[in-house]
């Protein structure tokens, strides 16, 4: 077959925007963590010394109690890396390992309430919202394309079995771990009204198109941080 006759794979990951909470401008809605007491002993009654011709035997010293070993205090959790831009997203259970690039909506995208990430296999971090890590002030949103007719990393997020899976998010200051709380689908027309846009510091939300209905639904993974 002539290669020029082949149809390119199709992808769908448009985004709707709505008014943001907290004065952040616009909200992108994407189509696309006992010490025991020492043991004591009661000393025995002293034994009288045996009579001697010229001397009195010294009394036998009473035994002393030995302290029981104490349990080591648990080490405190290591602090999470400071909030910073994410650079890589890994979900081993979904065989997903992608670079994460910053993405800010243009004025036109704000005006039309529609956002379409670049046509790549990468993930895109929505910069108007939260940064992940210690001191985060809002949810972190990452999106990526699901593709029709092509194996792509974000296609594998359309799996409710990922609940409980671990997510590793690499940032400019270190590596953060999250655990998936939910995998749900939303109609693209109503996603902008869902509770995923509530401000929840250091929560992670990953959005793509639902592979069973690329043009009508989104799949949304919500994850909470795992203590270090």
Image (cartoon, grey):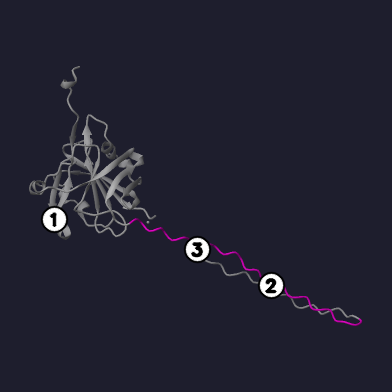
* Spot occupied by residue 46 in the image (x, y as percentages of width and height): 77, 78
Which numbered disc covers residue 104?
Answer: none
Quote the CA–CA distance across marks 1 and 3.
47 Å
Q: First in sequence: mark 2 or mark 1?
A: 1
The residue positioned 40% from the left and 58% from the top of the image is: 78
Badge 2 density bin: few <14, some 14–19, many ≥20, Cα 10 Å: few
The local secondary structure at tag 1 comes to: loop
Badge 1 density bin: few <14, some 14–19, many ≥20, Cα 10 Å: few
Between residues 125 and 11, which one lies in front from this camera angle?
Answer: 125
**What residue did someone put label 3 on?**
73
**What residue did someone put label 2 on?**
64
Relative to 128, 50 lies left or right: right
**What residue did someone put label 1 on?**
25
Name the front one of labels 2 and 1. Answer: 1
Residues drawn in magenta: 53-81
Secondary structure mainly formed by the magenta segment = loop
């Amino acid at each position: 077959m002539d290669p020029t006759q082949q149809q390119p794979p199709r992808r769908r990951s448009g985004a709707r925007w709505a008014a943001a909470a907290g004065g952040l401008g616009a909200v992108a809605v994407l189509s696309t963590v006992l010490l025991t007491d020492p043991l004591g002993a009661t000393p025995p009654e002293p034994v009288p010394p045996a009579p001697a011709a010229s001397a009195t035997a010294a009394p036998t010293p009473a035994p002393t109690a030995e302290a029981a070993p104490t349990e080591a205090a648990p080490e405190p959790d290591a602090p999470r890396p400071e909030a910073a831009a994410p650079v890589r997203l890994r979900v081993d259970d979904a065989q997903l390992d992608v670079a994460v690039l910053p993405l800010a909506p243009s004025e036109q995208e704000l005006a039309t309430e529609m956002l379409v990430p670049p046509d790549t296999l990468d993930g895109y971090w929505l910069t108007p919202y939260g940064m992940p890590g210690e001191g985060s002030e809002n949810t972190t949103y990452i999106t990526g394309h699901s593709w029709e007719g092509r194996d792509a990393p974000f296609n594998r997020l359309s799996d409710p079995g990922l609940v409980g899976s671990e997510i590793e998010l690499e940032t400019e200051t270190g590596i953060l771990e999250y655990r998936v709380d939910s995998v749900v689908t939303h109609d693209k027309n109503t996603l902008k009204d869902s509770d995923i846009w509530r401000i929840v510091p250091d929560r992670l939300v990953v959005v793509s198109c639902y592979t069973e209905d690329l043009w009508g639904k989104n799949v949304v993974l919500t994850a909470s941080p795992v203590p270090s």
